[in-house]
Image (tube, rainbow, N blue to C red):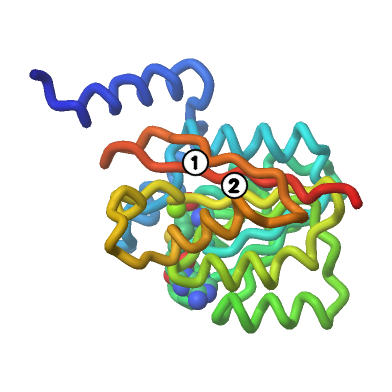
Amino acid sequence: MPDERLILQEYDRYISGLFASEDDALKSARAEMQREGMPEINVSASEGKVLHLLARIIGAKRILEIGTLGAYSTIWLARALPPDGKLITLEINPRYAEVARRNLQSAHLSPKVTVKVGPALESLSHLQTAGEAPFDLVFIDADKEGYPKYLQKALPLLREGGLVLADNALPDAVLDPKTDHGIKRFNAELSAHPDLISVLVPVLRSRGIDGLTISAKQKL
Ligand code: SAH
Ligand code: MG
């Protein structure tokens, strides 16, 4: 039997070849991350396109991202913004944040994007008090144990009808009833949340299959 992962890679290559080809800025963002020895844990091009399209569909003008790395997903999201749009992205690692800023500059997105350095929970509190809310879309993609708290903190910052997206929502651990995992708690909370209407969509990765949750904040 052929290696299942190789087949998944082929499917993903087919999808991104047609729908999510990378331009120079996206290619060089990945090359820069590699050169800096950063982990290759950015979203795939096809998932980047999903994020981009969802932001466009809701006409997002203000986007909040939790977990920047080298700004690969940030570039996909920020490109969905109108000329007066704004994206704030939160990153704990100052070295990663520097690489992200450089990549955003090369992509001519610096005027629209602010990289905020620090633990996301603290930055989320600052955003609340600084009057940065409301956001149209929140993308959660930082440390997985933190997801339930990020959801709790981000929801009040989101407008009604806005979207919460979360990456890496389908780790192997979801199938193991014995393990405790931040994502399992997150998915369970999401599915039961009275203010959200949600689904978990499988996405293809070079490592195998993963997931993206999509939630809309219900109008009251
Ligand atoms: N969204 C990126 C990938 C993010 S990887 C992309 O797809 O291109 C996860 C990032 O979250 C890492 O850069 C890591 O440093 C950051 N991170 C981990 N814990 C964090 C925390 N408590 N606050 C903010 N960022 C955190
Ligand atoms: Mg991720």
Is residue 29 left or right of 191 when viewed as pictured?
left
Q: Where is residue 61 drawn, in percent x and y?
A: 83, 48
Q: Residue 132 at what x, y percent from top left?
A: 83, 70
Give the percent coordinates (x, y) of residue 131: 87, 75
- Report whether the residue tagged 1 is closer than 8 Å to ligand 1: no
Q: Is residue 164 above or below residue 116?
A: above
Query: Circle 1 — which element?
Result: helix
Alpha-carbon span between mark 1 and mark 2: 7 Å
The residue shown at (19%, 27%) is: 4
Q: Residues within 10 Å of mark 2 (few under 14, many from 20)?
A: many
Residue lying farthest to the left in this orientation:
1
Q: Nearer the viewer, residue 8 or 145?
A: 145
Query: How far across and how far down the image is residue 181, in percent?
Result: 38, 65
Identify the residue at horizontal 58%, vertical 34% (top origin). Answer: 50
Residue 191 in view: yes
Picture disc at residue 156: none
Of residues 15 and 195, the one nearer the viewer is 195
Q: Which residue is mark 1?
A: 26
Residue bearing mark 2 = 75
